[in-house]
Amino acid sequence: LSHGNDLGMHGWTHERWAELPPDEITELTLRATEAIRTVAGTAPRIFRAPGGASTTHTRKLLRELGYQIDASLTETGAPSVAPDGFACLPYQWVGVDATHWLWNSRGPTEVEQIWEAALLNAAHNDQHIVFIWHPHVMGIDPDRLALGERLIRHVQSDARYRVVTLRELREHLLNNDCLDTLTPEDA
């Protein structure tokens, strides 16, 4: 936190979030938020739904609890910021390490080509791309770690890209009048 990183909440036990009834979502969100606040001394402000998909109920609850970002999947895949500043900043499955190494058996060379193509596509279309690298997926293999290091160096050396936190992406959207027309019920 002292280095500018943010805390996020990702469920309680990696539940299939979008399949949960609203009362269970509420209970788990409250429990996880309080557990993080107790341990870290500050509440999380970012949420990413386990399994990818969030719900309207979740986003309403997150707003009530002071969250600023839902980083779950969205129908459009485009980032959006509501007039009250609450942001939906989705990721894309292509950037998730588990997509390639847990659910498929691709080699690092193939994944590197896929990720480089995804970066080019994002730059060409003026879009963001989120990479999610898990310690138990990316971090257990030296070739995967080396790929991650190469990709980071590539991004840092190319003026078309910027490495930003989700908070920084939200602030950029807010400061550049990129507000969406989402209503509090939809966002």
Image (tube, rainbow, N blue to C red):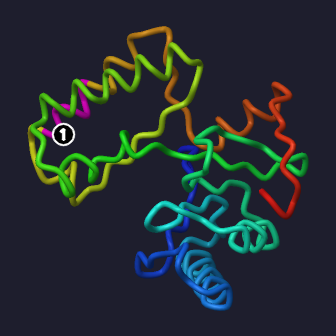
Where does the magenta region start and end?
A: 144-150
Q: Is residue 78 shown above or below 115?
A: below
Residue appearing at x 46%, y 43% in the figure: 92
76, 153: nearer the viewer: 76
- Position of 175 compared to 105: left or right? right
Give the quarter of the image for residue 164.
top right
- Compared with 45, 121 (above or below) is above
Residue in front for this viewpoint, 124 or 8: 124
Residue highlighted by disc 1? 145
Foreground residue among 165 and 184: 184
Tell me which secondary structure the magenta stretch mostly adopts: helix
Across and down, in percent, residue 22 comes to 67, 85
Examine the rendered structure and indicate whether residue 102 appears above or below residue 12.
Answer: above
In the image, residue 92 sits, relative to residue 128, either above or below, namely: below
Residue 97 in picture, x, y percent from top left: 28, 47
Give the mark count: 1
- Is 145 inside the magenta-drawn segment? yes
In the displayed structure image, the side of residue 34 where residue 65 appears, left or right: right
Quadrant of the frame with the C terminus: bottom right
Q: Reply yes or no: does residue 148 show up in magenta.
A: yes
Q: Secondary structure at mark 1?
A: helix
Residue 30 falls left or right of residue 135: right
Q: Pinpoint residue 185: horizontal percent, then vertical percent.
A: 84, 64
Residue beneath the point at 67% across and 61% down: 45
Q: Residues within 10 Å of mark 1 (few under 14, many from 20)?
A: some
Name which residue type carries label 1: Leu
Question: Where does residue 103 sit, x and y in percent of width and height?
Answer: 21, 56
